Amino acid sequence: FLFGMAMKAFATEDMEYIILETGLGGRLDATNSIEKPVLTVITSIGMDHMDILGDTVEAIAAEKAGIIKSGVPLVMDGSNPDAAKVLKKAAENAGVYCREITENAYEIRKITGKNIAFSTVNRYDDTAEWEIPMAGTYQPANVVLALEGMSLLLKGHHASWSQALRHMRWPARMEEVKEGVILDGAHNMPAVKALAESVRARIDGMEKRGRIILLFSALKEKHYDEMISYICREIPADLIIVTEVESARRVPKEELKEDFEKYTDKPVFTEDTSEKAWQRAMQEKREDDMVYCFGSLYLAGEIEALLRRSEYAEF
């Protein structure tokens, strides 16, 4: 129904391009009713929504591959070999041009607290330098996918792209919402692994390191115990605050606290709401400390809403 509403709205406008993101999977998604898109893009594939899409990365990739259409070019993330094998076979069967992007397509040059500089080599430029105002080490791969898609659509590299990338913003994706405070929507294992990698890269780039404070919440259908175990192993947190989001699917804060205490001896505090958890985190934060808020897109949305309120503008 929502998809039909969107198509009706687009039909009344003079649209040059429409980007349709699948809601879940691909093969059976409503967006896949478009029979002749001009381009298909498949980003990184991880283990999520397994109750619907399948319990192996190959099964999930097969569902994603359902958007591949005969005669329509494909740009795909090839970082997972098992997923890439499925996607490339589907592209071959459909007889389409397939551009695979792996970590060899770019090289990270510099990571600061707020920016990543990286270079690419492709058929349009010997070497191109790019900079994005994001701290997530996974973002260059996303950018290269987008650049390759744009190159296919517009037949070449355009000088304005570099400036556009320097001014891009992606809410709740390693977003520094305040000095030393990062908001991220990581809510499954692939995203938590990417977050942990970005946290460690940022620590390595710091001249002076303060404490790391985590603000965390989760939904019941996510593998939150596995996420918490990984977080405690891979992120050197000094203090953890857990809370509950406004959803019937929320995990009780006491259960989250118990899970963290299974894997860490660092102090774990509970707060009833995301607002109280945010207040606690800001009270605990010292000048050189870093605060990472993640675990649920609901949590990210609630914190974003808090920050739009005048009393939290300078909190």
Image (tube, helix red, strand yellow):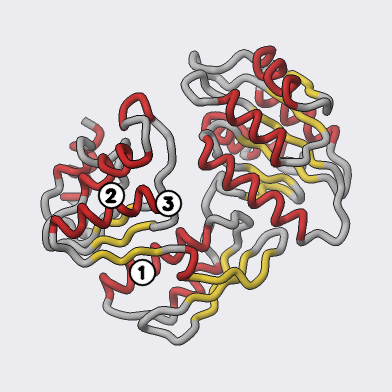
Q: Reading the chain from its start, which is encountered first: label 1 or label 2?
A: 2
Q: Is residue 90 above or below residue 165?
A: above
Work out which quarter of the rendered image holds the C terminus and state it: top right
Q: Amino acid at mark 3?
A: Asn
- Residue positioned 26% across, 64% down in the render: 98
- Mark 3: give few (<14), some (14-19) or many (20+) Cα within 10 Å: some
Q: Amino acid at mark 1?
A: Glu
Query: Residue under circle 3?
Result: 80
Helix, strand or loop at label 2? It is helix
User: x, y (%) of residue 285?
Assistant: 84, 39
Q: Amino acid at mark 2?
A: Val
| Disc 1 from disc 3: Cα separation | 19 Å
Q: Reading the chain from its start, which is encountered first: label 2 or label 3?
A: 3
Answer yes or no: is residue 311 visible.
Answer: no
Q: Residue 148: give its label.
A: 1
User: x, y (%) of residue 244?
Assistant: 62, 19
Q: Is residue 157 above or below residue 92?
A: below
Helix, strand or loop at label 3? It is loop
Q: Residue 86: give its label.
A: 2
User: x, y (%) of residue 202?
Assistant: 72, 56
